[in-house]
Image: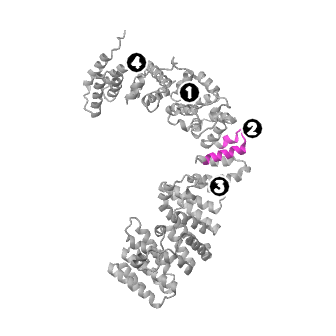
Amino acid sequence: MQKPFDINVELSEVEALFQLEPAVDIELQRLMKLYQEAKADKKAYLAIALLIDIAFSMKTEKVKAQAAQCVLRYLQGAKIGRMGEVSTQSSHFCDFMLYCNDKQCWSVCIANLVHLIDNCGFNYKTYYQMVSALSTFDEWIGTEKCTFQERVPSIDKKHLPYLFLLIPRYVCACYCDDFLSGVSTTSHFVMTGASLFIEDAPKHSNWFWAGIEVLYRHCRKFGDGSIILRLLSSVPPSSPVFAQATKEDAIPIVRITRDNTKQKARVFALFSHMGAYPLLVLYCVFDRSTLADDLKALDQNHVNFAVFYRDVLQAMIQFNHLENLQAVLSVMPRSLAEACSQVTVEAVKANPAFYSLLSLAPFATHDLLNVVLIVLFAASSQSAAQWEKCRLFCQECLLAEFKRQRNTLVLLAELVLGVFYNGVYAPLTTGTPLQQETVVSGKARVDGVLATALRAIAQTEDYKKAREAIAAQLLDLWLTRINVNAVFTPSQKDALKVPRLCEDAHLKSVFVSSCLQVLMEMTVMGAGLKSLVLFAPVVSSFLVYVKATRLQVQGEKPQLLCFCEMVLRTVSYMHPSFGGLRALLPAVAESCYPVVGAIVQMCYELIGSVQTGTVTAATMQEKIRVLQAEALGCGDKALLQAIVNAF
């Protein structure tokens, strides 16, 4: 006969074993101190909780076994609610429950859970250790590890929905008929406080589907989803449980039927009834296997195909989940082809990772350019391999579209000026998954791709034939964005000794953006002297910026030197006597701030002489002597040699 439980005696027996493993660990010492304080304060539940933590922090099995027996006997005889208190004070309560796996203890644990439900005191965060233990207990239902699979007297039908959120396998094993009876006759599935039982409850349309998600997790180790399908098959199709379905409702069903053709057929038959129609749509979005064949076999008597395919495609866009798009398109009736085309456009906008689907539908040029930019910015944060693949694809898209439609370049310039110059991200962020931060962080990478694409376009025969007409349109675009009449204050003008300056807060982006530099060069080279109304103030502003920063802003110097090269190269074509300037280009990349400033100053003054028509034979020689003196003072041997060779 087992002796009556005396907590002091039991604790003393366990304490005697503590000597087997002296508490040298700081955390263990802290637990020992708290344990002694709890005993002194006669807080038995707290002492028991700390005893669990001490025992499961020790490596000695004998200590753990003796402590577990002590705790087990205490909990088996404790009043209702006490186990819950112990679980909140112990970080190893779950370990203890699984270690013992005691039939009576599981019964007491479930009874304590029901007590908490009745008193509106349950919260999965507060009782995390108890929830963790019961989750594993539920996974063990029907297996050799299961030690308790019986009804608990205190459980009533009203408790079953709450228990279904925590221990659904237990509910299905011991209360299946009662549970299904309640589900079948329930007029609504609203549960106040469902989020207190399961964190993801708000993601589901109702508590039933939240419980199905838990049931799936507890069944997946055994690969058996039949219990879920039996539950669903027992619910009347007209039940409100199927209304307002969410993605999270469908995912467990998709997973359990992924590799099971028979189960999938059951799902299609069940969900084809209009009561479960929303779930059928979501199922087709997220299912990944043999979907095309399943759609062909779909019962047209229960499903309006025109509405169904539209809903499926729209759901794919809504959830940015397009894996099944091609499968759906392959079986979609031809009468829906036009709608399919527009849906595909929207799909790529919604999920840039699927840019290869661009070939499935014709695009208007403006739509294509928007999509290409969205795709590029989205890919800029991907792996090097993904980025390279996307970069090449988009460059080819831009080049091919220009050859097909000459106004492509002007439309692209309009977008580029908006994004890289004015910072207008709306075309890229509206109705897409891209955030403004993604656009800002991806600018450098995308900038290079667009610059390369623009250079490639500039080499085509189509561009060369229409260069002047295109440049005239580009010039108009620039002039709508840059205030060429604004000037700096007189003191700034006098200090820098430049006659006309352009003040614009965004001009820095022109100086450091490769695609804007190429666009500026294409404009000036194509529009000729007409472009000087734009180019002269931009160069003067660049001169101001160079002198203000002295090329010392971190990360900017390479781009600023490139802009300097562009200015020098462009000016070299403005007059026959300026041609020698092109020989100086290789030396610019290694030049220091004073030399760069002198080069830009020279270019600005040469532009001025072209504007006023005062270029003479001596103009170039005079400017070169000034530049040569600056290079000599700075010891720029490369530039000095280039000057000697050219002039």
Q: Amino acid at mark 1?
A: Pro
Q: Quadrant of the N terminus?
A: top left
Lower position in the chain sequence, tag 1 or tag 3: 1
Residue 302, image quadrant = top right
Residue 301 is marked as 2
Left or right of 192 on screen, residue 276? right
Quadrant (top left, top right, bottom left, bottom right) of the C terminus: bottom left
**Mark 4 secondary-structure assignment:** loop
**At numbered mark 2, what does the secondary structure look like: helix, strand or loop?**
loop
N-terminal-most mark, 2 or 1: 1
Residue located beneath label 4 in the image: 78
The front one of 35 and 230 is 35
Cα distance, mark 4 to mark 2? Answer: 61 Å
Q: Position of residue 56 (x, y in %)?
A: 34, 28
Is residue 34 located in the magenta-colored stretch of the structure?
A: no
Q: Which residue is mark 3?
A: 360
Q: Which residue is mark 1?
A: 161
Question: Disc 4 to disc 3, how far (Cα)?
Answer: 69 Å
First in sequence: mark 1 or mark 4? 4
User: What's under tag 3, amino acid-wise?
Assistant: Leu
Compute the Cα span from label 1 to label 3.
47 Å
Whether residues under marks 2 and 1 lie with C-beta atoms below 8 angstroms apart, the answer is no
Q: Is residue 225 left or right of residue 71?
A: right
